[in-house]
Amino acid sequence: MKTIRDFDLKGKKVFIRVDFNVPLENGKIVDDTRIVESLSTINYVIQSSGKVILCSHLGRPKGKRLPEYSLKPVYEYLKNVLKAPVKFLEDITGEEAEKILAELKDGEVLLLENVRYYEGETKNDPEFAKILAKFADVFINDAFSVSHRAHTSVVGIAQLVKEKGIGFQMEKELKYLSKIVGKPERPFYAIVGGSKVSTKIGVLKSLLNKIDKLIIGGAMANTFLAAKGYSVGNSFVEKEYIEIAKEIIKEAKEQEVKIYLPVDVVVERDGEAREIGLKEVLEKDKIFDIGEESVKFFCDSLMGAKTLVWNGPLGYFEKEPFHRGTVAVARKIAILSSITIAGGGDTISAIKLAGVDTAFSYISTAGGAFLEYLEGKELPGLAVLKS
């Protein structure tokens, strides 16, 4: 794949697929991480006298022009952080598009309205791709987090534009992910948490071929505990995946990969948080976090790691006091001397809550793409750049 450095950008329309799918509250950006990560690519085009056209989605408006999914808050943000004129185009398909594009000067920036306002986006519609291609002399994908989706602004437009490549954020993402997908430095440990086993079966099975230890937390640990015969009370558990969990436990043993599960838990019982042993879980209990013994057990198991990948929180960290387990483990990871890579929106939020977001080797803004890449799948958004 070519990078943005491989093109002469002066005077050209440089269409950058970014990921500005940022959390909003009352029309204000709550977390600007994804925007900040894209600024190096945007500024490079500005300094190269190119015409910057930024394209992103926000939420799931499903082809409808819903005001709560407008990118206008991002437009206001960009006007304050970029040292260049920034314009906003509300309708990609309207007459105004031709006019604003013709008037766009070198070094200026044009932000397109939410691309998912158009039904053709998620369908990878060829006609919609032609409309987007009018905005591009050069296509740059700088949004690894959406590269697992065969959508028009990721794949369709790239098939129509001759000059195409990746931006600096994408380049950095692939550089670090290659450290765990290729030949990671051993010992290689993985922490996998979050809610569901069902969404992470592929990555769990793929990791078993590479890792030395697997630490499982979050609600998905309930399914594994149930597979080992423990009662998890009224906790969330994917009963239909208990057999799958047994298979993964068996396969891990065959591959000589040690699996670490919680040895104690924090439950909500009668409206209160209680730390108890696994055999003390009652029918009415809901497991929301790992206990202190589990924290020590997990942290001790991390010693000696050369490479560590983490995806998914270890408890219901959004609600106190169930954040403690995830925060404690995050802080332990932060002082390791190994290559530490984390990915996924919830994981990032948990790391920020722990105050250690600058201590990791790399934090990926991607969720689904992060998991699929770890599985070894070829992402459509990357494959089209090789053609």
Image (cartoon, rainbow, N blue to C red):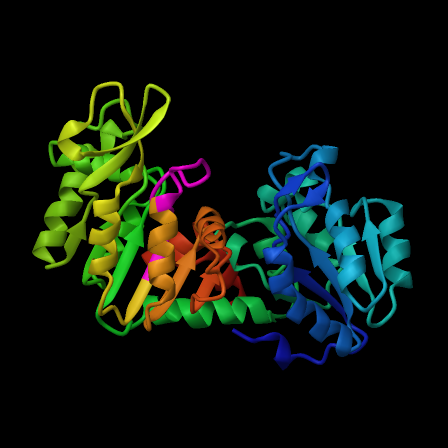
Tell me where residue 70 appears, x and y as whole percent.
Answer: 73, 41
Q: Dividing the picture into quarters, in which one does residue 219 lie?
A: top left
Q: Is residue 323 magenta?
A: yes
At 61% from the left edge and 50% from the top edge, which residue is drawn?
A: 31
Q: Nearer the viewer, residue 163 or 322?
A: 322
At 70% from the left edge and 75% from the top edge, which residue is drawn?
A: 44
Q: Is residue 366 above or below residue 383?
A: above
At 40% from the left edge and 42% from the top edge, which residue is drawn?
A: 323
Q: How many marks?
A: 0
Q: Is residue 81 magenta?
A: no
Q: Please indicate whether residue 21 sits to the left or right of residue 345 in the image.
A: right
Q: Please indicate whether residue 167 sits to the left or right of residue 347 in the image.
A: right
Report whether residue 307 is seen: yes
Tell me where residue 212 appears, x and y as whole percent.
Answer: 18, 63
Tell me where residue 115 appears, x and y as whole percent.
Answer: 68, 46
What segment carries the magenta color?
309-324
Q: Is residue 231 above or below residue 134?
A: above
Q: Residue furthest left?
A: 254
Q: Is residue 47 above or below residue 174?
A: below
At 45% from the left edge and 35% from the top edge, which residue is drawn?
A: 319
Tell me where residue 55 appears, x and y as whole percent.
Answer: 69, 54
Q: Nearer the viewer, residue 224 or 174?
A: 224
Report whether residue 377 is seen: no
Q: Nearer the viewer, residue 121 or 107?
A: 107
Q: Main secondary structure of the magenta part?
A: loop
Q: Is residue 246 above or below residue 279?
A: below
